[in-house]
Image (spheres, grey):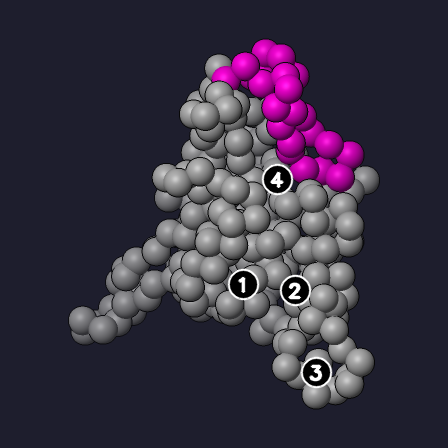
Amino acid sequence: MTQYAIVTDLNRCVGCMACMVSCKVINDVPIGNYWNKILRIGPYKRADYQKTNDVDMYYLCVQCQHCENPKCVDVCPTGASMKMEDGTVQIDKSKCIGCQFCAMACPYGVRYLNEEERVVEKCTLCEQLTAQGGLPQCVSQCGGRARFFGDLDAGIETFEAPRNAYQADRENADFSYDQLFTGNRITVAELAEPYDESEVHHLPNANNNPNFVYILRGREWKGAE
């Protein structure tokens, strides 16, 4: 089995929104719609709050979670929404009738109706890139290298992000910047600070088993709210 997903190290996310912008550009997402959104969580009081600056905050990216048991697939009357062999949830636009049952069934509100085409759209995990060995655009363009792409069945420590381009350029005179998309990778195990299981989170589970993973250290997880 394969289950493609994204791991986000929330301690590394700087809220630059490069993932949102690059996603809209490469996927031609209409104005006013987004395939992924960055939410600011907080500021909120720490558990040991005593003075006004005893607060925390972080940024949380929300998009299609490519769930194990996607409710959007269950309610689709035409079979347009499908769970693929690589674990992603995709939409066959030729079958979509724009009824929006899937959008209503999604617990995360990450589907929308393309008013011009009259079909529902959402994150595809950039299948046009990953099918050729590349990374999703939101991963390759992440300013903080907080996002990693991979197969959950191989373990989140194997998920990959681009390695620092300038460092690679110094180390390898033959380095090509095209390798940012098809090679020159760094893994969660290599780049991320240590974390334990209590610091690994998912968005709320509405019996759909969301697959995207969020790592958050030293701060209170608010994603369940």
Label 2, secondary structure: give it.
strand
Q: Is residue 96 magenta?
A: yes
- From this view, report whether residue 157 is shown above or below residue 209: below
Q: CA distance from mark 1 to mark 3?
A: 19 Å
Q: Nearer the viewer, mark 3 or mark 2?
A: 3
Task: Give whichever of discs 1 and 4 has the lower sequence position.
Answer: 4
Give the quarter of the image for residue 48: bottom left
Task: Give whichever of discs 1 and 3 has the lower sequence position.
Answer: 1
Q: Position of residue 139 (x, y in %)?
A: 60, 58
Q: CA distance from mark 3 to mark 2?
A: 16 Å
Question: What residue type is disc 1 on?
Answer: Cys
Magenta span covers which residues? 75-98
Mark 1 = which residue? 142
Mark 3 = which residue? 169
Question: What residue type is disc 2 on?
Answer: Ala
Q: CA distance from mark 2 to mark 4?
A: 18 Å
Tell me which secondary structure the magenta stretch mostly adopts. loop
**Labelled disc at residue 161:** 2
Task: Give whichever of discs 3 and 2 has the lower sequence position.
Answer: 2
Task: Give whichever of discs 2 and 4 has the lower sequence position.
Answer: 4
Task: Give whichever of discs 4 and 3 has the lower sequence position.
Answer: 4
